[in-house]
Amino acid sequence: MSGTRDRLITALLALWTVLVLVLLYVPILSVVLASLANTRYMRFPHKVWTLDAYRDALGQYTTAELHLTSLKIAVLVALIAVLLGVFGALAFARFEWRGRSLYQRLLLLPIFFPQAVLGLALLLAMTAAGITPSWRTAVFAHLVWVVPIVTLVISIRLYGFDVAQEEAAFDLGASRLQVFREVTLPALSPGIVSGGLFAFLLSWSNLPLSIFTTGSDTTLPLWLFSRTATNYSPLVPALAVIATGASVLVVLAAALALAGWRRLVARRSA
Amino acid sequence: MRHRISPGFLAMLPVMALIVLGFALPILLVFLYSLMPPRTFSLAGDPTLANYRAAVTEGYLLPLGWSLGLAGLTTLVCLVLAWPTAKALVRFAGRFATLATILIALPIFISESVRLFGTALFMMPGGGIFAGSLNALFGLKIGSILYTRTATLLGMVYIHFPFMLFPMVLGLSLVPQDQIEAARDLGARPFQVFREIELPLALPGITVGTLLTFVLSLGANAEAAILGGQAVIVITKAIEQRFGYAQDWPSGAALTVLVILVTAAVIFPVLRRVDLDRLIRR
């Protein structure tokens, strides 16, 4: 009896999960569907299905400019976040030191904080300090939120790291720098790569911090946000699809580069 | 002999510098501004509580109330929706669960603007994806919930669902399966198993998910802007208006402090107790 019931529950849970997945992707599919029209107003189902909006979007200077601004910010955020995150993670998970527990909790505060409120606080602070908000200040704002996340991601990797490897290297006469470069860093590299990708994607897609900290510069999510309310045309969903596709491309490129680099290292050490 | 500074202390310095400069200092500044006379732009004025009084008398507690209410409801709905999903992901450990996990996580990296915009396109009356399809397929004409509070709530649930789900999965995966089976063998009913075993053991994960969802949705403003139309003014919107349009920094700062206080009241008691090493180390 309990066997049939168990099977029923399992089936229901599977069905539920599929339903959740469908619901999660309905809005994303909606954007793609809306981009395939050529009418100024949404009249679904479209009379004519066309890629005109994509041709338009790719031909516009705004498209390139928006992508460039978002890319500039996201790349800088990823690089700086990884650099700070490696050291942050060493302090978080590798070393035993007085104050570590307090540090672990302080680090979480920016994550457990409403982002838009952080953006507003930063805007007030910057204006009071006489700093004009621009894409540069957006990099800083993103970092405040992204660095703690990257630190956590690398820390998770560090928890699985065997300290004995470092000690062995020291015993064999390696210097502190050598140990860090040849033992610790390679062991951390999966965490560093996923941390960097996290940082890039979170910055690329961020809206609540960017709204208040970019000044007159505009990122992709910001432009989309402003155009959802006014000035609708199929160009808007088309650009949303292009922007999302661009981030997928970056992730794929990073994955490929990493695979190539691994092969290179493997060949060199063989 | 040189006094040795621990390497852990040195390693945390850059990150802490960023948090002090980009988090603690701005919050301190907001706090100081909230005590300045209304409509002033320097910190040299005499401290006053006028802004907090004005926040109460001029009706700014209403947007705060809306944000609190929406955040509370979002958290509740996410709890209910995430529980069976988390159970499924833990029960089906394997290829299906991995695929489902990746598919649920991916949208986090697609901008909120895109996802909420898509929700609006789906809900639009007349020629929207949903209404248009129904009309074309079955000749059905339906109304729309776009630009209502319900739509705002749905958008908030949609955006924050993963933040509830993943900590919950983490917590639930800590519950030993044989303990559940032992309880069942001893005659425990499903609800007893849930209340006496699953819930207490998975509680750290559920708590983290609940906190994250509540705090993040407390500051949510894109949902109300894209899906809510004029139906609801959330606290972030009200603060933005005080800072920008009204050019009243101290008044905006006072409202910001109120949100920060609510956040702190929710976060601090829990953060003190959760054992991070145990939750993160797998």
Image (cartoon, helix red, strand yellow):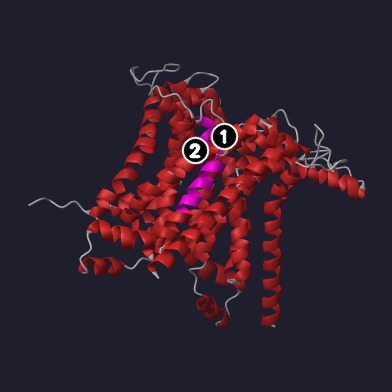
Query: Which percent across, then down, holds residue B155?
Result: 65, 44
Could you tell me how far apart the alpha carbons at marks 2 and 1 are, in whole angstroms? 9 Å
Residue at 57%, 46% in the rendered image: B72
Please state the chain letter of the residue tagged with numbered disc 2 in the rendered image: A
Q: Is residue A159 visible?
A: yes
Give the image quarter of residue A219: top right
User: From the image, which quarter does the C terminus of chain B lie in?
Assistant: bottom left
What label sits on residue B282 in the rendered view? none
Which residue reaches farthest left? B1
At a point 28% along the width and 65% down the height, the residue shown is A166
Residue wearing tag 1? A219
**In this view, which residue lies farthest toward the right?**
B139
Part of the protein shown in magenta? A195-212
Q: Is residue B83 visible?
A: no
> What's the residue type where badge 1 is placed?
Thr
Secondary element at tag 2: helix
- Dominant secondary-structure state across the stretch colored magenta: helix
The question of residue A205 being in magenta is answered with yes
Residue B169 percent coordinates (x, y): 54, 63
Give the residue number, with chain letter if any, for mark 2.
A73
Horizontally, is B230 left or right of A96 in the view?
A: right
Location of residue A6 in the rendering, given as x and y in whole percent from the top left corner: 67, 77
Q: Is residue B211 magenta?
A: no
Label 1 marks a residue whose chain is A
Q: Position of residue A4 (x, y in %)?
A: 71, 80
Name the foreground residue: B93 vs A1. B93
